[in-house]
Amino acid sequence: MAKTGIYTFIVCLLIGVTAYASFYVAPTESTMGLVQRIFYLHAPSGMTSLAAFLVSFIGSVGYILTRKPRWDWLAVSAAEVGVAFCTVVLLTGPIWAHPAWGVWWAWDARLTSTLVLWLLYVAFLILRTMIEDADRRALVSAFFGVFTFLDVPLVYGSIWWWRTQHPQPVVFTSAGLDPTMRKVFYLSWLSLTCLMALLIRQRYELEQSREELRTLEQELEAH
Amino acid sequence: MPLLSNTAVLLRKELQSEYRSHELLTTASVFILIVIVLFSFTFDPTSAESRQFGPGLLWLAFLFSASLMLQPCFLKERTNDTLSALRLAVSDPFAIFLAKLCANTIFLLVTELLLLFVFAVFYNVAVLSVFPKLALVFFLGSLGIATTGTALSAISSQARMREVLLPLLLMPLLVPVLIPSTEATKALLEAEPTLRWDWLGILIAFDVVFLTALWLFGEYLLEE
Amino acid sequence: MSQRIGRPAGFKFNNIEKRFGTLYALRRVSLEIAPGECVAVTGRNGSGKTTLLRIASQLTRPTRGDLNFSGLSDGDVPSIGYVSHAVMLYDELTAEENLLMFARLMGIPKPEKRAVTLLEATDLASRAKSLVRTFSRGMKQRLAIARALLQEPGLLLLDEPGTGLDTESMAWLVNTVRGLRDEGRTIVMSVHGESALSQLATRAMRLDAGVVFADTRSGATFQAVFAGTEA
C-alpha cells in the first residue's frame, strides 16, 4: 500500500517536472511557437500507447498458454490504458494541427495509424462486453488480442507505404530537434511510461478485486 | 497427410452445401451490386473519375459484403451442433478452419470477379486485358479477408450482437488488406497498367501472418 | 450390429469440476467406469449428466481435475462414439453423404462399404439418398447412432437417446443398445428415469446438482438410485 503511494507520488512528481520543462525549459520552436509544446505530450503518448498494447499482447498470449485469469486481467488493463493514451494522441493532434498548419486533421502516416489502432482496441474492449462467461470472454478476447497486435505492424506498414506513394505535406514532425528539446522529449517519455505502468497496475488490481468478489459470490451461492 | 485430406473432405462439404442452396453467393453478389449502384448516385461515374474512385468503392463493397457473408460460417454449425461432430471426427482441428477459409476465399473470389465485370460495364473501365493480374490481386485480398473473417466468425458466434460485432471487429483489422488491394487494383486499371509487387508483398505478408496465427491458436476458439 | 469390436475402453474422473460462468455443472466428481460396463446415469435436468458425457467425450474441458482412459494399449487414442441431444448431422446432405463424410474424416478404410453396412443395420438403407432435413426424429436418431458407430467405438456415450422417439423407434433403440452391450462395448447413457433402456444397464448412478448422489457400485440398489433416495 505504502509502496503504491510512494510510486504514485514519484509519478506525479515526474509529470509535474515534465509539464514545467515542456513550458519553461524547452526552447520555443521557431515557426509554430507556443502550440508546438504539445509535441511533448503528443509524441510520447503515441509511443506509450504502443507499449501498453504490447503489454496487452503479452497478457493475451499468457492467458492462452496458461489459462490463469491474471493474464486476462493484464490484457484488459493494458488495453484500456493503451486506448486512453491513444485518445490523447488523437485529441492533441488536431489541437496542434489547427493553429500550426490551419487544418484540423492531416492524414499523415502516424496519426492515421494511431486512429486505426484506436479503432482496433476499442473493438477489443467492445468484444469483451459482449461475452458474459468470464472464462469464455478471457479466451476469446485473448485470441482477438493476439490477432489485433499482429495487425499493428501491418497497419503501420501499409499506411506508411500508402503515404509514401501519395505524399502529403509532412506534419507532426520531430525532425530537427534541438538538444534541450530532445531531453524534454525523453523526460516526457519516461514520465508517461511510468504513468502507464501505474495505471495498468491500478486497473489490474481493480479487475482482480472484481473477479475475487465474483468467485466469493459464486462459492456463497454454491453453499 | 491427415490435415490435408481432412481439409479436402470438409472443403468438399462446404462447396456441396453452397451448391445446393446458393445462399451465400446470391446474397453476396446482390449486395455488392446494390452497393455499386448506390455509390454511383453519390458521384458522377464518368470514366476518368471511375478509374480513380472505382477500385476503392469496389473493395469497400467487397469488405462489407464479406462481413455479411461470413456471419453464418460458424453459426450454422451450431444449429445441429455439427461442430461437435467435426471436432470428434477430425485429427487436427485446424482442418475445420482451413476448409472454411478455403471455401470462403473461393466464394469471395467468385463474387468479386463477377462484380468486376458489372463494374467494368457500369463505369466503362477496361478490365479484360489485365484480367489475370486482377484475379491475382483479388485472390490475395480475398485470402486475407477469408482468413481473418473465418476466425472472427468463430469468435462472434460465441458473443451477443454478433451481426454487428463481426463487421466491427473485422473492418479495422482489414485496413492492411484494403489499402494494398485498392492501390494494386488502381494501378492495373490505369492507362498504363502495372502490377505493383510492393502492394502484393504486403498482402502476402498479411496472409502469411494470419494464416500462421490461426494455425497456432485456432483450436482454442473451438474449445468449450 | 458389426463383426469387429473396438477394444472396450473405460474412463476415470479425478476430482473433475466444471464451471460455466457462475454455474457449477459438476463439482468434484470422481468416478470410474470399467471397460465393458453398461451404465445408466440418471438425475433431474441440470444435474450435470450432459456435462459428464461431454467431458468424457473430450468435447468439453474440465475447469479442474483430470480424465484418464483405461483399457487401451500404450499410445492408443480412445475410440469414442457420442450421441447427444442435438442431432449432429448436416440437414442439407443425404444420410449417405453424412456418413461418408464423417467416415472419410475419421480415416476409415473403405468408407463407402462401411456407410452402406451401417445404413442397413440402422434400417435406413431405403432413405440413403434422402436429405436428413426430411427425416423424422426417430430416423435422425438412428442415423446419429450410425455415425457414432462408424469408428467401431470401444466407448459409447449416449445423452438421453430416447428423447422424442415413438414406441417403434424406442423399441429399435433398446434392441440396438442391448446388442452393443452384449458385444462388450462400454456404454454410458444418461436417462430420465426408469425405462426399458435403463433396464439394460449393469450399473446405475444418480447425479444431483453436479455430484454423484448414489451409485449401485457403492452399494445402492437400482430402485434407490432411480427413486432418488439414499438407501
Image (cartoon, rainbow, N blue to C red):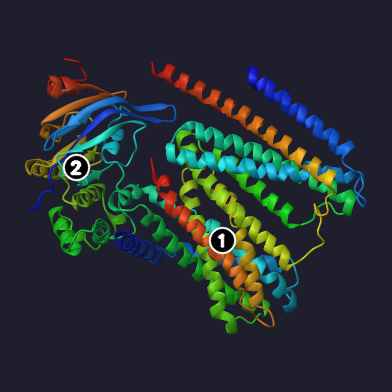
Please state the chain letter of the residue tagged with numbered disc 1 in the rendered image: B
The image position of residue A69, as x and y in percent, is 48, 32
Which quadrant of the figure contains the C terminus of chain C? top left
From this view, report whether residue C131 is shown above or below residue A72: below
The image position of residue C16, as x and y in percent, is 30, 29
The image position of residue C12, as x and y in percent, is 21, 32
Q: Which mark is residue B65?
A: 1
The image position of residue A28, as x and y in percent, is 91, 45
Q: Name the residue beneath numbered marker 2.
A: C156
Q: Nearer the viewer, residue C219 or B117?
A: C219
Q: Are marks 2 and 1 on the same chain?
A: no
The kind of secondary structure element at disc 2 is strand
Q: Which mark is residue B206?
A: none
Please state the chain letter of the residue tagged with numbered disc 2 in the rendered image: C
Res. B82 visible in picture: yes
**Cα–Cα gap, marks 2 and 1:** 43 Å
* Quarter location, residue C64: top left
- Circle 1 residues within 10 Å: few <14, some 14–19, many ≥20: many
Residue depicted at x 67% and y 77%: B123
From this view, report whether residue C160 is shown above or below residue C45: below
Give, as a three-letter code, the residue at label 1.
Ser
